[in-house]
Image: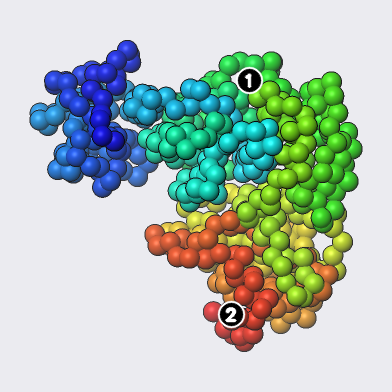
Amino acid sequence: MDKGFQLRTLISGMPDLLVIGADTEVRGLACDSRRLVAGDLFFALPGVNCDGHEYILAALAAGAAALVLGREPEKDYGVPVVVSDNVRLTMAKIAQRFYTDPTAEALVIGVTGTNGKTTTSYLLESILKAAGYTPAVFGTVDYRCGDKMIPASHTTPESIELLQMIAEFRAAGADAIVMEVSSHALEQYRVDGICFDVAVFTNLTPEHLDYHGDMDSYFASKARLFELVPSAAGVVNLDDSYGVWLKESYPEALGFSRTENTDVGLLNLVSNAEGQQGVLKVEDETLAFVSQLVGDFNVSNLLAAVAAACKAGIDLQSIGKGIATAPQVPGRLERVENARGVLALVDYAHTSDALSQVLAALAGIPANRRITLVGCGGDRDPKKRPLMAAAAVKASDLTLLTSDNPRTEDPLLILEQMRQGALGTAERELSLEQAAAGAPGFVIIPDRRKAIAFAARLAATDDLLLVAGKGHEDYQILGTTKVHFDDREELRRAFSGDMPGKESDDEVRS
C-alpha cells in the first residue's frame, strides 16, 4: 500500500483502549513477526501454543511502526503502543478500517456448523452466479473468485489476511461473499470485521472438543455468528437439536428441514448413484430441482443453500438453475474413475457423524462388496476415533483402518484406539490373507499409501470403495512435516498399476 493511516485514525472511537506514545503512520498490519515489513502495526496475539508478546523484539527489529498489546508494557519500546483487553477483536476492527470496510456494500453469507459447510458454500456460489453475482468464496478447500484461487491455510483465516483478500477480490469485481465460518474463527473474533447479511447454521456434532472442551462451549462459539447479523437474517437446520435451540433464540430465522413442516423443506426425492432430483417447499412456493450431488444427506445442504438464497432475496428460477449447474465438490464423494467397474469415492468425512451419514447414503446404492478405508488425525479429539472405526465396520463388508494426519502422535496408538472401537462391534480383525480372500471384517494397515493400494487391488467390478477422512487435502502431516499426499492421486495410480499395489503382504504390513 502506497499510503497508510494514522494510528489514532484507525482506533478512533474504539472503547477501552489505552494509547501510549505519539501518533504515527501505519502502512500495513501484521500478527506474525516473520511476515512483518517496516511500517506495519504489530498485534501480539494470545495463542494456544505461544504468546505474541514473546515476538515484540523481533517485530521491532523488522521495523514495526507501533504495537497492539494485551497488557501494559513493562518498558519503553520506542514506538507507540495500544493496550487492549481483546487484541483479536481490536485487530479485526482495525483491519476493517484499514481495508476500508470491504464487505459494507457486498452481499455476505456466512455458513457455520460441523458438517456441510463446504458443500453448502459451493451450492451458494453456483446460485449466486446464476443470479448474476460475481461471488468470492472463502472455505476449507480454497479462497477463490473468478480465475483467482488461493489454497486455504485455514477454513477461516486471521482477520488481517481475510479482509485483505476480500478487499482484493472486491477490487477485482466481486459483489458477493460466501464464507465458511469455523468455530475457531468465531471464538477468536476473526470475522468481527465482516458485515454479514445472512448467517447459516448447518448442524452440530462432536468435533474440536480438544479445543472447546464440551459441546455447550462448541455450540456457543458457533452461535456467535448469529450475533453478527440482523436478528431476522438467520437460517437454521431444524433437524438438528442445536438448530432448534438456535431458532428459539432467533424466532425470525428461516428454518429448513427434511422432515418437519417448516419454511423450507423436502416434498419429494429420488436419489441414486448419478445424483438426485425432487421437489422442495420454499415458503409458500415449490421448487423442482435436479442435482448431481451424490448422497441423500446432501439434501440438508441443498435446503440450507436454498434457504440462505431466499434470505438474500434471490429468485427461485436462479436458485433452481444454480443447484442444477453446481459442480462436483472436491473431496466430497468425489468419484475416481477406473477401468475396473468399481464405484470409487473419496470423501472428507472425518467425524463419526459425517462418516455415518456418508455410509448411510451409500447404502442405497447397489454394490457387490462395500470396502471402506478410514483413518483419524492426531493431536485432535481422541474420543471420535473408536466411534469412526465402529461406524465404518458396521456399514462395510471390509474396513481398512489406516493412518490419516498423525501429526505429533504415534500413529500406531491412534490405530489401537480405532481398533478397540472396531472390536466393540463384534466384527473380526482379519489377516491380509483373509481380507484378500473375501472374509468380512477389518484389517489394519498403518501406511496409508499401502492401504489404498491394497484396497484398490481387492476392489472388483460392482464393488463400492470409499476412501474417507482427507477428501480434498493433498498432504499428510507426519510429525510437524507436511508432505504431499492426495487420496485421489493414490487411487488413480493404484487402479492403473502405477504404484506399489502388487507388493507382498509382508510389505503391506510394514
Taking 450 as reference, is 173 left or right?
A: left
Q: Is residue 387 above or below residue 197?
A: below
Q: Between residue 10 and residue 111, name the one nearer to us.
A: 10
Q: Between residue 146 and residue 26, name the one nearer to us.
A: 146
Mark 1: secondary structure: loop
Residue tagged by mark 2?
A: 499
The amino acid on which the numbered mark 2 sits, given as a three-letter code, is Met
Mark 2: secondary structure: loop
Nearer-N-terminus badge (2/1): 1
Taking 160 as reference, is 392 left or right?
A: right
Q: How is the image coloured?
A: rainbow
How far across and down, in percent of the image, does residue 120 sit?
A: 66, 39
The numbered dot on residue 113 is none
Residue drawn at x 87%, y 40% is 278
Q: Between residue 436 and residue 453, name the one nearer to us.
A: 453
Residue drawn at x 44%, y 34% is 171
